Amino acid sequence: MASANDEIDALMRTEIYKSREELLKDALRALLYMKPGLRIEIAIDLYKNEKVSLWKAAEIAGLCMEEFKDVLASRSIKVEVGGTDEESLFRLARLGLI
């Protein structure tokens, strides 16, 4: 039985993908489509490790801010409200508030 790396190498030889990273991004997109709950896990991890703001994590999870806060609270994860000014302005503009 071929390993995952063997299968990735085989796909790379077909030259369908320009890079291994492109192939992995496509595979991740397909995985998240099939298992959307994983988006929440990714968002929580990125938020807990301070890679993204609360706003961005909620967006990644596909939830509104309050829903995402509820998920965090249900897992006893402290909510730190913040974000960049640019991110806040973008969200306010998207909501038509500025």
Image (tube, grey):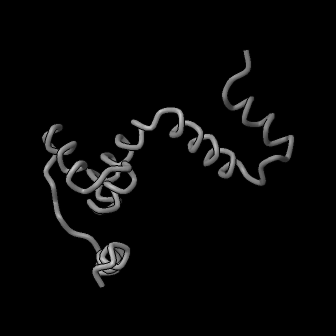
Above-or-below relation of 98 to 92:
below
Point out residue 2 in the picture as x, y percentages from the top left corner.
73, 20
Number of marks present in the image shown: 0
Q: Nearer the viewer, residue 28 or 90?
A: 90
Point out residue 87 in the picture as x, y percentages from the top left corner.
34, 74
Task: Say which residue appears at 26% left-offset and 59% top-offset.
Answer: 54
Q: Nearer the viewer, residue 10 or 94?
A: 94
Which corner quadrant holds the C terminus? Answer: bottom left
Above-or-below relation of 24 to 10:
below
Task: Say which residue appears at 62% left-offset and 40% top-offset.
Answer: 27
The residue positioned farthest toward the front in the image shown: 96
Above-or-below relation of 58 to 26:
below
**74 left or right of 91?**
left
Task: Say which residue appears at 17% left-offset and 64% top-offset.
Answer: 81
Task: Say which residue appears at 30% left-offset and 76% top-offset.
Answer: 92
Point out residue 44 in the picture as x, y percentages from the top left corner.
30, 46
Quadrant of the rendered structure where residue 5 is?
top right
Q: Nearer the viewer, residue 25 or 74?
A: 74
Point out residue 59 in the picture as x, y percentages from the top left corner.
37, 57
Which corner quadrant holds the N terminus? Answer: top right
**97 left or right of 34?**
left
The residue positioned farthest toward the top in the image shown: 1
Quadrant of the rendered structure where residue 93 is?
bottom left
Quadrant of the rendered structure where residue 95 is?
bottom left
The residue positioned farthest toward the right in the image shown: 14
